[in-house]
Image: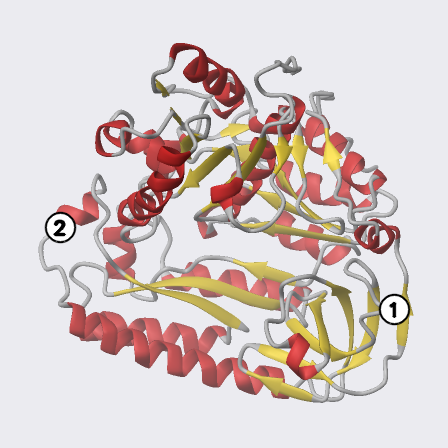
Amino acid sequence: MTISLTPDAAGRTYAVRTFGCQMNVHDSERISGLLEQAGYVRASGDDPDDADVVVFNTCAVRENADNKLYGNLGMLRPAKRGRPGMQIAVGGCLAQKDRGEIVRKAPWVDVVFGTHNMHSLPVLLERARHNAEAQVEILESLEVFPSSLPSRRESTYAGWVSVSVGCNNTCTFCIVPSLRGKEKDRRPGDILAEVQALVADGVLEVTLLGQNVNSYGAEFGDREAFGKLLRACGDIEGLERVRFTSPHPRDFTDDVIVAMAETPNVCPSLHMPMQSGSDDVLRRMRRSYRSSRYLSILRRVREEIPHAAITTDIIVGFPGETDDDFQATLDVVEQSRFSSAFTFQYSPRPGTPAASMDDQIPKAVVQARYVRLQALQDEISLAANRALVGETVEVLVATGEGRKDARTHRLSGRARDGRLVHFAGDASVIRPGDVVTTEVTYGAPHHLVADGTLLSHRRTRAGDIAAAGAAPRTPGVLLGMPKIPTRG
């Protein structure tokens, strides 16, 4: 897809603010790529008030998402009033949900676009300038698959690659299916072509992304398509790490576990949302599996990949959750031995079935349960990380992972199993995207520390690109092959 450079766009600066999940982060890379292809230039500095176009890519899943958006829009209003040529656009899930309501509440917004038509943004911005009035365009179904759009990647060493968009599940707490639509799978060849393009640009790590990533293939009738995709990624020379997020326990099959174990560049890590350990709560959530099924998957993963780090999502205080239900969650967490867990206090999301359920749990009860769950998980995480002291880890050096690095004179990155590692190293020599090996000297609940001498340091092309201040830019990928080659 090519967007013509317009005189109005040429040289104008833009900034994108992203809220929400990894899918939104990836979508924002596409939005940036679209704007740059249309002639916009990324604004320098961190203050979006200085940009000619500010784009908010919104989330409707988090609590008070609308308040956060309107608060940010309100703070930009004086800048917009002082600079008549400035434009503000709102996209993403909240835009899909609220539509014209955004312009009614914030009439200084110029463009509102949804999850299905972000490719329209440059045209809508131009139309809003020409017509001198707000443009609201929300499509009900996907018109252009996001990964066929150009992208400005934020990282030189790691990239997101969508395998699907949308979701066919009906979880009662989640509004995503109504905003992202039914699941649409990309052709395997398109996915592999995008991965190969990233690797050609120096990227070492790819994360396969989908709302329900391991149901990939359902649309074209191949239940083993995701396992085949993992194996095909293993054949891409130069691709050192493959991750994926987030799988659903209902669709987790043995062939995926075996593919993870047998494909060397697939990382020994798994993030699989559990949400609750209570079968009654899972039933009310419409999660389509029970705790025994969840635990059986973990057992199989650990049989095949004993050193795998497993993480999860858990919601505390879902409507009707009793003390016994919550205890069941604590029991499953104790058995699961997660390396870490993202824990959330339930709050109603307008438009979801759970929001109108009886027996909403008082805030104080939810908070008390949340604290107990966090304390248990921190204890489990601490024990697991302390057990790694003395182990050698390979670290892909990252940016922005260690907020205290300047004060502690450390660098940071991720081990192959996804654990955060802060290590002693010379920032004038070691660049983001380089790979080091080091020995763990300390384990904390949420990270590892390696304060000894580095065992090795490998300079990479990704590090060269980072040192040059560049980032990969990929064109839209639409080069599909009919199927993933199977192995003989």
Quadrant containing the C terminus is top right
Which residue: 73% across, 32% down? Answer: 474
**Residue type at the position of mark 2:** Met
Q: Is residue 360 above or below residue 444?
A: above
Question: Horizontally, is 99 left or right of 145 in the view?
Answer: left
Residue closer to the observer: 237 or 276: 237
Q: Residue at x 45, y 33 (%)?
A: 166
Residue sitting at the far front: 82
How far apart are labels 1 and 2 at the CA level?
A: 57 Å
The percent coordinates of residue 252 (x first, y second) are 53, 49
What is the x, y in percent for residue 382? 54, 85
Q: Position of residue 242 (x, y in %)?
A: 71, 51
Image location (x, y in percent) of residue 297: 52, 60
Give the foreground label among 1 and 2.
Answer: 1
Residue 369 picture quarter:
bottom left
| Image side of residue 418 versus residue 453, left or right | left
**Residue in front for this viewpoint, 214 or 45:** 45
Tell which circle, 1 or 2, labels the residue nearer the N-terminal end: 2
- Indicate which disc residue 357 carries: 2
At label 1, counting other C-alpha atoms closer than 10 Å, the crowd grade (few under 14, some 14-19, many 20 or more) is few
Position of 95 relative to 158 (above/below):
above
Name the mark on residue 429: 1
Q: Residues within 10 Å of mark 2 (few under 14, many from 20)?
A: some
Which quarter of the figure has residue 365? bottom left
Q: Is residue 442 left or right of residue 326?
A: right
